[in-house]
Image (cartoon, rainbow, N blue to C red):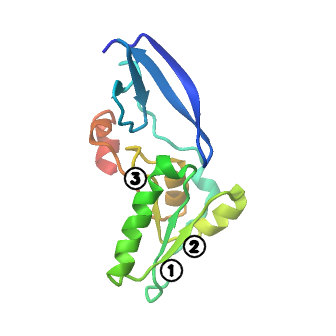
Amino acid sequence: LGIDAVEIRHHQDDIGAFPVALAVAEEHLVVDMMEVEAPGVVKRRVLPARAEFLPYAHCDPREWEVVPPSPSEAPPVVLHAPSHRAVKGTRHLLAALEDLRAEGVAFEFVLVEKLPHHEARALYRRADLLVDQVLLGWYGGLAVELTALGKPAVAFLRESDLALLPRDFREAI
């Protein structure tokens, strides 16, 4: 498909607004970074071939103090802080956590939403594991912040996007 035009629109739903890159290509609507299932909608990368990957990091790790994990006898604290539940896949995470609880797996779940950053950051320190985003195919800024605290982060990474990374970075993640 040849890309004829690209524009950024803001999608609004009951949770809030978020940007969506839209393009028109041969009379099809092309949506980048969103999973859309509808007739006439094609998911496609709209970045030019000359685009170069730069690691996504919006925080300075020197400003974040590594926090040791909870004592091993305490149930682990699983944290999720979606900026937009539908985009981040929160319903899938909640269903999976419900299944784990039904199987008797002990954990504490912390859902962080609609808080000022300094309050959310205090909750991040308690986490033993972050589940970032499970639909988009890449990690978000929250994963960068939690790994700066020394916390492991889980995110769905799209295989086709991994091919765009420099080899050493791809192997490290």
Which residue occupies 66% across, 67% down? Answer: 122
Q: Are marks 2 and 1 in contact (CB under 8 Å)?
A: yes
Identify residue type, mark 3: Val
Estimate the spatial distance between the alpha carbons at disc 2 and disc 3, rounded to whole Å. 21 Å
Which residue occupies 60% across, 63% down? Answer: 112
Classify 50 as above or below 144. above
Instruction: Name the residue carrying label 3.
Output: 134
Find numbered disc 2 in the image and state the secondary structure of the residue it sits on.
loop
Classify 74 as above or below 90. below
Which residue is at the far bottom?
73
Find numbered disc 1 in the image and state the secondary structure of the residue it sits on.
loop
Instruction: Name the residue carrying label 2.
Output: 126
Classify 10 as above or below 117. above
Q: Earlier in the sequence, mark 2 or mark 1?
A: 1
- Residue 140 image point, x, y percent: 49, 47
Categorize mark 2 by other alpha carbons within 10 Å: few (<14), some (14-19), many (20+). some
Q: Earlier in the sequence, mark 3 or mark 1?
A: 1
Q: Single out the mark in the foreground, 2 or 3.
A: 3
Estimate the spatial distance between the alpha carbons at disc 3 and disc 1, rounded to whole Å. 25 Å
Q: Are marks 2 and 3 in contact (CB under 8 Å)?
A: no
Classify 62 as above or below 123. above
- Residue 97 image point, x, y percent: 40, 70
Front residue of this view, candidates 24 and 66 = 24
Which residue is at the far front?
39
Which residue occupies 44% across, 53% down? Answer: 89
Categorize mark 3 by other alpha carbons within 10 Å: few (<14), some (14-19), many (20+). many
The picture quadrant where one finds residue 81 is: bottom right
Instruction: Name the residue carrying label 1.
Output: 70
Find numbered disc 3 in the image and state the secondary structure of the residue it sits on.
loop
Front residue of this view, candidates 67 and 75 = 75
